[in-house]
């Protein structure tokens, strides 16, 4: 799937989410919090930590000065959350992550100068997901006849799609070449992979409409780059690109 097609898919999916949200807003909604807002938009910023398992990661680490931890980076996203009742909510999430790492060939340097043979590796992941969230203690508590917002702990799980892109760009070594074995090349592939995730977090109410939150997620996803990429490393490994990761967020929630 090309770069432009990938962004068309993301735009179409976002449009579907927004249209669905607008339709839901147009319907009469019970306000079960005694007048408290029962839906929210959350903005999140945090760290993305790939587990870096699988054939492609192993091949990269064996040939280049590259480690999975080099791809630890910043992730940003937002969620639309709709409450069903005091203990159950539904979320729609869209996140953005991208990181570029400079790496060198482990075994070769330029003849004469001894200079490193360098290239860039870029990974980007855009998960579009839905989930169910359970609030064991609820979002509010009773104080006489009043319902009062409280710190809300939630756990949940869900699924969705990862729109991914992987690129290698720079100088490489062809060990079978006659003469100068160093050449410039580029490999780039993108696609959509199924995703599963679990999450846990807590929201702290500043007032009835503005909350701050801390959240952690664990996601599982596996991409399949083009088969020719296995030959790129001249290694008999599979080229699965594991996108499993742990994400830690801090953010704000606007309830309405």
Image (spheres, helix red, strand yellow):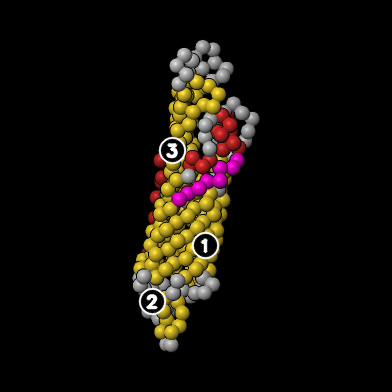
Q: Is residue 242 magenta?
A: no
* 70 w.r.t. 42: above or below: above
Dot 3 falls on a residue whose secondary structure is: strand
In this rendering, would 130 be left or right of 251? Answer: right
Q: Quadrant of the C terminus?
A: bottom left
Seen from the viewer's position, the closer of residues 170 and 231 is 170
Q: Which range of residues does the magenta coloring cover?
A: 47-54
Residue drawn at x 52%, y 52% is 246
Residue pointed to by mark 1: 200
Q: Position of residue 180 (x, y in %)?
A: 49, 14
Residue 166 makes an appearance in the image: yes
Disc 3 or 2, which lies upstream in sequence? 2
Residue most toward the top? 179
Give the distance between the C-alpha atoms of the residues marked 1 and 3, in whole angstroms: 29 Å
Camera-side mark, 3 or 2: 3
Residue pointed to by mark 2: 36
* 163 w.r.t. 42: above or below: above
Q: Residues within 10 Å of mark 3 (few under 14, many from 20)?
A: some
Disc 1 or 3, which lies upstream in sequence? 3
Q: Position of residue 63 (x, y in %)?
A: 56, 29
Q: Is residue 49 magenta?
A: yes
In this rendering, would 159 be left or right of 79? Answer: right
């Amino acid at each position: 799937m090309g770069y432009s097609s990938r962004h068309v898919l993301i735009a179409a999916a976002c449009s579907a989410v927004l249209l669905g949200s607008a339709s839901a807003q147009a319907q009469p909604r019970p306000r079960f919090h005694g007048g408290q807002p029962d839906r929210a938009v959350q903005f999140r910023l945090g760290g993305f930590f790939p587990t870096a398992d699988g054939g492609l990661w192993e091949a990269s680490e064996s040939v280049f000065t590259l480690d999975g931890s080099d791809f630890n980076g910043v992730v940003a996203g937002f969620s639309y959350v709709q409450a069903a009742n005091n203990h159950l909510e539904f979320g729609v999430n869209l996140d953005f992550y991208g990181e570029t790492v400079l790496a060198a060939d482990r075994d070769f340097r330029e003849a004469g100068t001894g200079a490193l043979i360098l290239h860039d590796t870029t990974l980007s992941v855009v998960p579009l997901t839905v989930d169910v969230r359970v609030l064991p203690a609820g979002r509010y508590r009773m104080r006489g006849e009043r319902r009062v917002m409280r710190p809300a702990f939630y756990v949940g799980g869900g699924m969705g799609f990862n729109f991914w892109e992987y690129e290698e760009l720079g100088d490489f070594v062809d060990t079978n070449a006659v003469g100068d074995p160093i050449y410039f090349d580029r490999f780039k592939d993108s696609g959509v992979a199924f995703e599963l995730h679990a999450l846990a977090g807590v929201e702290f109410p500043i007032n009835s409409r503005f909350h701050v939150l801390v959240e952690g997620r664990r996601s599982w996803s596996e991409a399949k780059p083009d088969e020719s990429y296995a030959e790129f490393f001249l290694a008999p490994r599979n080229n699965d690109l594991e996108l499993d990761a742990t994400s830690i967020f801090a953010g704000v929630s606007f309830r309405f």
